[in-house]
Amino acid sequence: MKYPIVKPFLPPLNDYTAHITSIFERNWLTNNGPCLQKLEQQLAEYFNVEHLLLVANGTLALQVAFAALNIDANKKSSVLTTPFSFAATASSLCFAGITPEFVDINPNTYNIDITKVTPAQLSNASAILGVHVFGNPCDVDTIEQIAKQHDLKVIYDAAHAFASNLNGESVLSYGDIATLSLHATKLFHSVEGGAIIFKYKADYLKAKQLINFGFDAQQNPEFVGINAKMSEMHAAMGLSLFKSLPHITAQRRALTVRYAERLTAIAGLELQQWHDSGENNGAYMPVLLNSETVLVQVQKVLTEFGIQTRRYFYPSLSLVPAYGMQGSTPIANNISERILCLPMYTDLALDGVDEICECLIIALKQAS
C-alpha cells in the first residue's frame, strides 16, 4: 500500500535501546518503575494537569474511570454517551454491566449533542460519557451545565485528543475524568497504553489502587480492582518519543491544513467542523460523502490507487445489538454510513497529501 491509513511514528532506535538497557540493568520491569514515573511526570507537565495515571490501554482507562467514580451496574443506572465512536466507548460500559444510553450527535462536529437528551434518559442516568471525536473538543460548557443540573458525573473519552487544545489549554483538563489512548496508531503512543486524567485527587488515589488489584499500602485488597498497570517497556517507548512531540504536532497540523486547502469546497464531500475555540491536533482526516453508495465506490477506487482508507465509525454503536440499542440517533446512524478517513500519519509528506487529494477527486468523479 503506497499510502496506509496510519503508520506508527517511531523514535531513533538508539533512544529506545538506551531506555531498554537501563531497564535490563535495574531488572525492574513493571509495578510503577522509574520509566513509568518519569513519563507520567512529563505528560502531566505537558498537559498542565495535576493528576495523571498511566495504564495498560485506553479501554482499561475507561473501565477504571467508571469504577473510580462509583458508576456501576449495582445502581441500575445508565450512562449517556454517543453512538459515533469506536467500539470501546460502548463495550467498556457493557463489560462493566452499565447500560449505554445513546444520544444523537451534532451533524457538523460529529460530537454528542447533549441538548438532544430526553427527560426519560436523564432520569435514569448517572453520568455523561462524551467523546472528543477525531480530537474535536465537545461542547464542554453545555455538557457541564446539564451535568450540574442533574447531578451527573462527566467523563470524556479523549482517545483521539492528545495535543488537542480548547481555550488555550489541553482538552484533557475538562470533566471529572478524561481518558487517553496511547495505542501505536495514535499521534503519541507507547505501543500499547493509556492514561487517565482526574479533576479530583481522591478519584486519582482510588484509581491508583484500582489498577493494582485494589491493594492498599499493606498490599491487602481494600476493594475489588484489576491489573491495568503499564509496563516499563511500554513507558520506555513513550519516553523515547516524547522529545519528538514538537515535530509530531507541527507536522500533523501542517498536514491537516494542506488537506483542508485541497478539499474545501470540492463538490460531493464535507469536512468536520472544528470547535471555534479549539486547535486541531491532526489526529485523523475524515471526509463526509453524499451517500454510502458513493463511499463504497470511492473507497474501491482509492484502494486501486494504493491509498488505504477506513470507515470510522461504522456501524453506529446504537445499531449494535450487543450494546443494547438504547436511544434514537438518526443523525449518527446516517453519518456513520457516509464517513471515510483518509491517510494521516506523521511521516506523510505534503506532496503525498496532494496526490491523495488528486486521486480522491478522480474517485469522486467516477462515483458520480
Image (tube, rainbow, N blue to C red):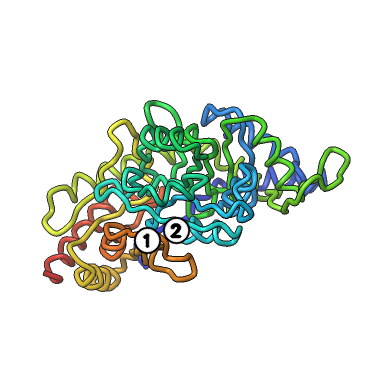
Left/right of residue 178 with respect to residue 331 in the rendered view: right
Residue 97 in the image: x percent, y percent?
59, 60
Q: Is residue 247 above or below residue 332?
A: above
Circles 1 and 2, Cβ within 8 Å, touching? The answer is yes
**Residue 278 image-quadrant placement:** top left
Left/right of residue 295 with respect to residue 280 in the rendered view: left
Q: Which residue is mark 2?
A: 86
Q: Mark 2: few, some, or many residues within 10 Å (few <14, many ≥20)?
A: some
Tell me how many marks there are.
Answer: 2
Q: Is residue 358 visible?
A: yes
Helix, strand or loop status at disc 2: loop
Helix, strand or loop status at disc 1: loop
Left/right of residue 52 with respect to residue 133 in the rendered view: right
* Quadrant where the C terminus is found in the figure: bottom left
Q: Is residue 192 visible?
A: no
Q: Is residue 153 above or below residue 112?
A: above
Direction right: furthest residue = 218
